Amino acid sequence: MGTLEPRFRRKLTLESSTWVLCGAVALALFSLNCEASANANASAQHARADAEEGPDFDKPIGDKELAAKANANASTPVVDTALLGARHDLSLVGEHANAICACVKVGIGSASSAAFQWQAGAPHLNDDTELTFAMTTENQPCANEPKGSTGASYWGYRIVGNDVIVFLEGAREGRPRTSAAIIPKPLGNGQVYVAPAKRRLPYGRTLDGKGERCKIGGAMAKRTTPFSQTELGDSTARDANNAPTVDDVE
């Protein structure tokens, strides 16, 4: 075979280079397509796995799931704090009274104290600002008790300085008698007293009948939080030496 023309050799070389370049480009594109396809398949597999591990809302909740939810809820309990005011679900255990005053025995303390008997379990109190108050007239002599009265009944309280004074009125026939309450805790070295809601009533005086207030005592754990406006009410607008105005018991 004769010698190839120089022009023909150049054309053949150029065509060979072109084919090599095309082959390289095609191989690269194929590799990219394969990698993209592999990534897509992997993502789809992960998505399927996540879907399989996620909650199935059509499937009934098993005992383990229910127990887990219950434990999670139990770890963050919601506690309701008892409000100030009269309680009809509490009575005083007389032998644990803090003081004996005219016509009544009185006890104060935390809701869980042995002095108190709750009908349906003790409520939760704010131990820094609240006290439980209860009284009983059982086996207590009561001189000068008004006609028609069925015994001492909680009327309300007033804050005077750092002290808390609980006022007692006479219950009427046909009306429930209130013998317990949640009251503010005295501030610092303040004390709790009971006193008659009307000057001529005997309830809550000293045993000799001469003192207008009977001292019950203070809290073992001193209160450090100042009285709130809700606790004070209109206490600051009243004369601390005057008993509150209530209906007389005839």
Image (cartoon, rainbow, N blue to C red):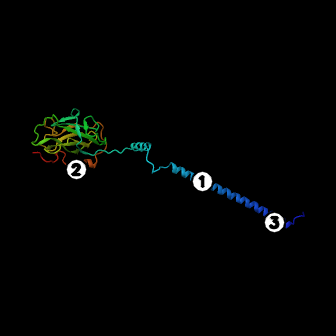
Q: Amino acid at mark 1?
A: Asn
Q: Are discs 2 and 1 less than 8 Å apart at CB?
A: no
- Residue at the disc numbered 3: 11
Q: Nearer the viewer, residue 61 or 118?
A: 61
Q: Which percent across, then down, holds residue 232?
A: 25, 48
- Residue at the disc numbered 1: 41
Q: Nearer the viewer, residue 181 or 31?
A: 31
The quadrant holding residue 172 is: top left
- Residue at the disc numbered 2: 234
Residue furthest right in the image:
2
The image quadrant where one finds the C terminus is top left
CA separation in Å, label 3 and label 1: 45 Å
Residue at 60% from the left image edge and 53% from the top image edge: 41
Residue furthest front in the image:
59
In the shown orientation, is residue 203 left or right of residue 3? left
Task: Say whether disc 2 or disc 1 marks the residue closer to the N-terminus.
Answer: 1
Residue furthest top in the image:
95
**What is the total number of numbered labels drawn onto the structure image?**
3
- Disc 1, SS: helix
Q: Residues within 10 Å of mark 2 (few under 14, many from 20)?
A: few
Q: Which percent across, then down, holds residue 236?
A: 22, 48
The image quadrant where one finds the N terminus is bottom right
The quadrant holding residue 142 is: top left
Q: Amino acid at mark 3?
A: Lys
